[in-house]
Image: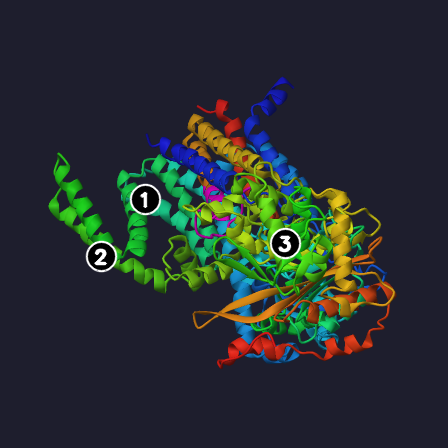
Amino acid sequence: MRQLLLFILIIIVGLTFITRLFYLQVYNSEAHNLFEDNAIRKVYDYPKRGFVYDRNGVLLVSNQPSYDVMIIPREVKPLDTLEFCSLLKIDKEQFIKIYNKSYHYSPRLPSVFVSHLSKEDYAALQEKMRKYEGFYIQKRSLRDYQTTIGANVLGYIAEATQYQIDNDPYYNMGDLVGKQGVELSYENELRGIKGIKFIQKDRFNRDIGPYKDGIYDTIPQQGKDITISIDAKLQEYGEKLMQNKHGGIVAIEPSTGEILSLISAPTYNPNLLVGRKRSKNFTRLYNDTLSRPLIDRGLLRMHEPGSPFKALVALVALQENAITPQTTVSCSGVYHYGRKGTMGCHCGGGRRDLVLGIAKSCNSYFANAFRKSIDMYPDASHSMDVWSNHMKSFGLGNFLGYDLAIGKKGNIPDGAYYDKWYPDFNWGATTIISNAIGQGEVLVTPIQLANVTAAIANKGFYFIPHIIKNIDGQTIDEKFTTKKQTTIDEKHFDPVIQGLFDVYNYGTAHFLQVPGIDICGKTGTAENFTIIDGKRTQLTDHSIFIAFAPKDNPKIAIAVFVENGYYGARWAGRIASLMIEKYLKGEVTLTQMEKLVLEKSLEEEYAKPYSGTPFTINK
Amino acid sequence: MYRETNRHFKFDWMTIIIFLLLIGFGWLNILSASHIGETIDYLDFTQPYGKQLVFIILTFGLIILILSIESKFYERFSSIIYIVSMLSLIGLFIFGKNVNGATSWYAIGGMTIQPSEFAKAATALAVAKYISDLQTDIRTFKDQIQVCIIIIIPAILILLQNDAGSTVVYASFFFVLYREGLPKAYLIIALLLVCISVGSLKFGAIITAITTSIMILAYHFTRKSKPMFLKTLSVIIACIILSFGIKFLYQNILQPHQQDRISLWLRLEKDPIKIAQMRRDILYNLYESEKAISSGGLTGRGFLEGTRTTGKFVPEQHTDYIFSTVGEEWGFTGSIFVVILFVLLLLRILHLAELQKSQFSRVYGYSVASILFFHFMINIGMVMGLIPTIGIPLPFFSYGGSGLWGFTILLFIFIKLDSNRINEW
């Protein structure tokens, strides 16, 4: 028996070791992954981010170098914090706070300690950096905006969020990614591919040379330059016109669907969101709830389309044979429907055919046309479905599919929509007659309205609006070069376009003519309600305008939306005319009109609901 | 002529083959752990791997010398070898060179020699000689004391040189004595000692004292032949005193770094921040070695491919922590290969020891197995974080001339003794 003691112990120890080895190496293994190996330093080489040019080759966005101080908390040795803080221009409390945050993120992985040093600070720090173990400087590339316009279109880059880092292995803590606009939409093209160097460290964290002589290292691949469809001059001019006003302008080239300008007002200088003051400025912009400069109104502002929608109502009625261009309605200044229903009309009264109806924006005419369309089928719900499908073929009621990340669906009601609304009521055309003049349950965004205008200009088709024109020589997404056909036959467009042309000739926008350019347009005024102290209160109407020009072979289709701008021709119409002239002629001859627009501020109008005192509207 | 050839084949070739495998594989790992840069000059004698190569070559000379000496020599001269060895240990107090706080080396020219590595073999010879003496009866208290003195002299000398790790190895002679008839009571006392020490530190003196008392009482009353109650009572009192005394010993005898090692091993510290700090400061080697082993995975990263080995993350990796290189570069497969080699070697020595006809050879063989087993258990156990850090080398594997030669002498004396088995009656 005595012989067995050591014998058994040897076996037990052997088995224990094998079990432990199994646990360490197989069950709980940290098997080889270069990226998680803290014996290997990963040094990233950030590529140049692609430049952004406008459609005429004007450089809009380039790069500038920036230096971040990075920290690997575990490797930090006691240091002269006072000197270090003064070099970084932070105080000791901040130092401790950032240090703890980084440690909490990971003691072993690098985190950003202070971002975006200025060149001067960098120069001062660089010499002394060797003294501070655990800290190093990471060079990055920041955006350098060559312009002050188009903030919402161009977007901005900022540090990747924790969510992005967790979900995309490409990104590391502190990497800059596109957050909005073109920067976001074309992030993959613009960013390029960063290079990486693997460096073998020793236990004192000193580099002892490239890992495996650098066979796993990669060189960075430069980001691609992109050309966007924006016309910088037009964009700049539009932003100037929209000063002191809230709203959006969207201009599209009908023959391609390229977005010529996408203006949201108020806007901000994109340079505000670059560098060390970025987060302070961002907070300021973000918290500006009165003017909301970060909201792109051209893409996000849903509103009732108002009278421009009449053109579509007419087109559907024509397509459904509910009316012909020769159909006339006699307007008495008020349209009667049902037993007691009335709808006012400002057209001046008289006998209207289609062209005149559009030119004078006669409510009675389109109420009639809409009513006839809905009465085409015995079942109102079915009629409404048919009507809704026609409308949706213009890209309304759903996301357009453009290459910017934000948008709104808008709303085009269908049969089911009203069946749900009126479950116990046999609703009909007259119940929902407001839709005829673009004021019922119809909601659109400025870009949708611009797209509708382009589709009318093209007589029945459109290209999905897009901001991209060219990616470093490569072709753009096929969906932007494929024609989208509407459900309206081409022949029906002629009388409607004639009507839109007459809007400028003698109609509601006759005083907005631009010499030498045949413009087709349509004014719109939409009622504007808000809730003040729980009470539904009416504010000054929104001013809306759509236009395209020239009448034959259109080059530009535009939609303008000015919040609380009163009637359509007043501000939106003027701005549209000026924009068209600027784009087609390159200069503006309507200096009187330009001066009027530039000098007009609607800030007072926007302040009214917040003033707390009674106010008048539509003045 | 026939007799000559035959003699060579009487050596136990299985043991020799395992020995060669361990030395060879060990050297590859020393190379990996100590090379700098991409190019390797095998004959660069300033580097550990180059030096070790020389040590290995010299080892073969040593082996031939050991095997060619008449086996009776070792038995006859064991006392003299022991005395010379002890004198070499004592000499350290005068001529010794201090390395890392331990005065364990003689510096002769550019070389350093660590006599404690050779003292193990000398002590084994002396113990074998003493026990195998016809007059000796290990069951008597007098002989127990005397054999104990033989073992304790080198142990104390080495402890005084501040090499606690090597001292612990002398406890391995317990297995030898037990095999040769040391009363069971000692085994029980040893087990009790370990249990009470661990229990008292981990769960507190009161709980341990009560638990052990109850167990001893239960044992007392369930036995058929009732021993004297007074005897049982004195055992209980001793246990209680020990329970309370161990804390005092722990705090006053052990050095702070030893306390910390035990504290971490038994997880005595509760404050997680302090634990993390202790792990970083005290167990840095262990942390890194576990990490290196763990990163090896199933098949390892390959020879010379380990990033933690290349980056010298594990301090002392080519000496005490050499097994972590095996873990990282050769993975689970390589590691269990080494473990199995050691287990086979130990079992083979044990088996051969039992076959010996002379008691001297048997006791010596048993000593060899016990000493190697202790090194194997403590070194690999430490590198994998199973037992507290005790710095002793892995036999045949770790870098170091004295260690390599000490273990070679230890093993090959036994191989020589074993080869003579047939001639003895």
Q: Quadrant of the N terminus of chain B?
A: top right
Circle 2 is placed at which residue position? B206
**Residue B102 placed where, x, y %?**
52, 60
Mark 3 nearby-residue class (10 Å; few <14, some 14–19, many ≥20): many
Residue type at mark 1 is Gln
- Mark 2–mark 1 Cα distance, whole angstroms, equals 33 Å
Q: Quadrant of residue A121?
A: bottom right
Q: Is residue A28 magenta?
A: no
Residue type, numbered disc 2 = Ile
The chain under label 1 reads: B
Q: At x 71% / y 52%, what residue is drawn?
A: A188
Asked if disc 2 and disc 1 are in contact, CB closer than 8 Å, the reply is: no
Give residue B144's mark. 1
- How much space separates mark 1 and mark 3, taking CA atoms? 120 Å
Compared with A570, A252 (above or below) is: above
Query: In the image, B172: left or right of A381?
Result: left
Which residue is labeled 3 in the image?
A: A366
